[in-house]
Amino acid sequence: MNQFTTRPDIRGTFGTVTSTHWLGSAAGMAMLERGGNAFDAAVAAGLVLQVVEPHLNGPGGDLPAIVHIGETGETKVLCAQGVAPAGATMDHYRQFFGDGLIPGSGLLATVVPGSFDGWMLMLRDHGSMELAEVMEPAIGYARDGHPILPAVVKTIAGIAGFFREEWPSSFDTWLPGGQPPADWSLFRNPDLAATWQRLVDETQGDSREARIDAARRIWSQGFIADAICDYLDGAKVMDVSGAAHAGVLSRADMAGWQARWEAPVSIDYHGWTVMKTAPWSQGPVLLQALQILRNFDIAAMDPMGANFVHTVIEAMKLAYADREAYYGDPAHFDIPLDVLLSPEYGAERARLIGPQASLEQRPGRLPGLEHLADAAIARAARDFAAARGVSAGEPTMAHLTERRGDTVHLDVIDRWGNMVSATPSGGWLQSNPVVPGLGFPLNSRAQMFWLQEGLPTSLKPGARPRTTLTPSLAEKDGTRIAFGTPGGDQQDQWQLIWFLRYVHHGLDMQKGMDSPLFHSLHFQSSFYPREAKPGEMLIEPDIGEAVIADLRARGHRVTVSQPWAIGRLTAARRDPDGLLTAAATPRLMQAYAVGR
C-alpha cells in the first residue's frame, strides 16, 4: 500500500491538539505552552471554534465529551446536552404540528443551551487556568477578527435574503454593512466579544473554582439569561415550517439546568475497550456495529474492497435501526442497552447480513418492546410532507448543502496523560436568530424529538433529545486514542470505518484519515425533514470503479461523491511510554493537528 499521506502524523511527548479548524488547534496548544493541561486547552479550543466556525456550532449549542484523567486513570463522560423546556409539552407542540415534525429551525426547536456550562464544568473540575486566560483567544478573534472561511461566507450568502426579511438580528450580525463578507476577510463579532468580556469582568470569587461557578451563574441567571429570556418574551419568528412561532424556553429552564458527569458505556472489541456516551446520544450505535462485526473476519477483508464496504454498511443499517427504535434519554425511559450491546445479540444481528444489500428497516424485535420496532418501521416509511425552507438545520456534510449546519470536533492530550475528546455542535447561525446584544443564536436540537407518545424519544419536558453528537475514546494495553468527527448521522459511521482499518489493517492514524470513506443513508435521519432513503449510500470515488460497480451489483443504491468530500475526522493517541501522535483530515482544508 502506498504510504503517502496528505500530512504527517504529528508526534511528540509534550502535548497535542487536533481540531476541525487550525485556529482552534493553535489556541489549545497555546494553553499547553503556558503550562495548562488538556482540559484548559480543550476549553480554549472549543470556545475559539464557536467564533471561527459559527455555521457549525455556537455558544447556544450542545456539548458531549469523553475525558480521561491521567492521575487517577478515570474515564468519564461530560453531558452538556440541554433538556426540553418545561413548556415543551406534547399538547403545546401538537397544536401547531399535529403528530408531525418539530421544525429544524426556530424557537420551538430550542432546548436549554448546554455548551457553555459544560465547558465551565470541565474547566472547574479538571482545569488549572483562570477563566480569563482560556477565554482570551475567543474574545480576541471575536473582537479583532479572524479570516472567515469561504464555507461560512457561502452559508451566509445563501441565507442572506431570509435573514433580511425574517431574522434582522442575524442580518446585522453576519452581514455587516448589508453584504456578505469576502472570503478570508477579517470578520468580527463585536457583540459576542462584548458578551464574553463582560462575563469575564463580572466574575467574582475567592478561588478559581468560585470564579468559574460565578460565570456559570451569569450564564444561567445573570445578564446572558436575561438577554435571552427578554428577547424570547416578545419574539415570534419564522422557521422552516413556513410559519412564525414563539419559543417556550424560560428563565426557570435556564436557571434549573446544569451540565453533569456520567459514566461511559463500553464494550471490549479485539482487546480494545471502546467507550461512548449513553443512549441519549447515538454513541452506542458504534458499539452495536462492533458487536455485529466481531462475527466476521474483518482482518481478512481488503479495507478498500467491496466486501468490507458491504459488510460494514449492512452492520450500520442494523445498528442504526435499533437506534431509531430504542435509544433515548435513560433518565426518562428504560433503554434495553444491556441487551443491545451484548455479544449474543450482536451475533443474532450478524446472521441477518447476506450477500445482497437490504432495503428494509430491521430493528431487533426485543421481547415486550416489539411495538417500538413497529413504530420505528412505520416512521421511516411515512411521508411527513415537510416544508423545506432555507433555515432547515441538518448537521451533515457541507458538500450536501452549505445552508445546513454541522458540528466541530477536537481531541487533546497533554504530557500528564489527560485526554479530551469533544464534539460541540448546535447554535449554528442557520438555527435561530441571533439574540440581540449577545452575538449568538440559540440551538435547534429539539427537532430530534417525536410528537408521538410512548417512544424513548417522545417530546417530554426535562428530557434530553437523542443527539447525534458522539465523541470516542478507546484503550488497549495502556494505549489510548481519542477520536471523533462532525457529520450528524454519519459521525459513528466514519469513526467506525477509521477504527476498523486502524485495528484490523494497520492503517496508521493519518493514513486512515486519508483513505476513502463512505456512509449509509438508509435509516431515518435525526434531522428535519427526517427522511429515510432505503439502500442509498454515498462513497468517495477513490475507492475505485470496480468496487463501486460491485456494490451496485449487490443492490446498494450508490451515489459517488466528489473527491475528498466525506468525513472530518480527527484523532490523538498516547502510547504507554508517553509518545503522542495526532492526525486530522485534509477534507475541507481546515482541520489541523499540532503538537510537540
Image (cartoon, rainbow, N blue to C red):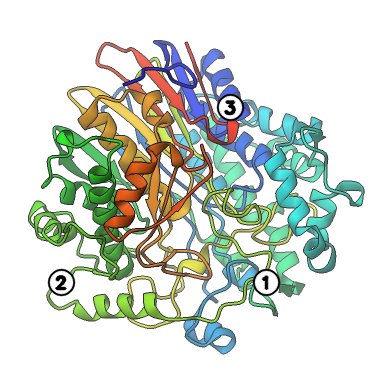
Estimate the spatial distance between the alpha carbons at disc 1 and disc 2, rounded to whole Å: 38 Å
Q: In this view of the protein, can residue 393 be seen by the observer?
A: yes
Q: Callout 2, which amino acid?
A: Leu
Instruction: Residue 2: name its quadrant.
Output: top left
Say which residue appears at 28% left-offset and 17% top-offset.
Answer: 575
Q: Callout 1, which amino acid?
A: Asp
Say which residue appears at 55% left-offset and 61% top-offset.
Answer: 112
- Is 439 located above or below residue 366 in the figure? above
Residue 42 % position (x, y): 50, 31
Compare marks 3 and 1 and give the one earlier in the sequence. Answer: 3
Q: Nearer the viewer, residue 163 or 463?
A: 163
Q: Nearer the viewer, residue 201 or 266?
A: 266
In the rendered structure, find residue 239 and report the number of the disc placed on it. 1
In the rendered structure, find residue 366 and report the number of the disc placed on it. 2
Instruction: Residue 453: name its quadrant.
Output: bottom left
In the rendered structure, find residue 512 and report the number of the disc placed on it. none
Q: Nearer the viewer, mark 3 or mark 1?
A: 1
**Helix, strand or loop at disc 2?**
loop
- Is 155 located above or below residue 362 in the figure? above
Residue carrying label 3: 130
Q: Nearer the viewer, residue 511 or 261?
A: 511
Q: Nearer the viewer, residue 397 or 250?
A: 397
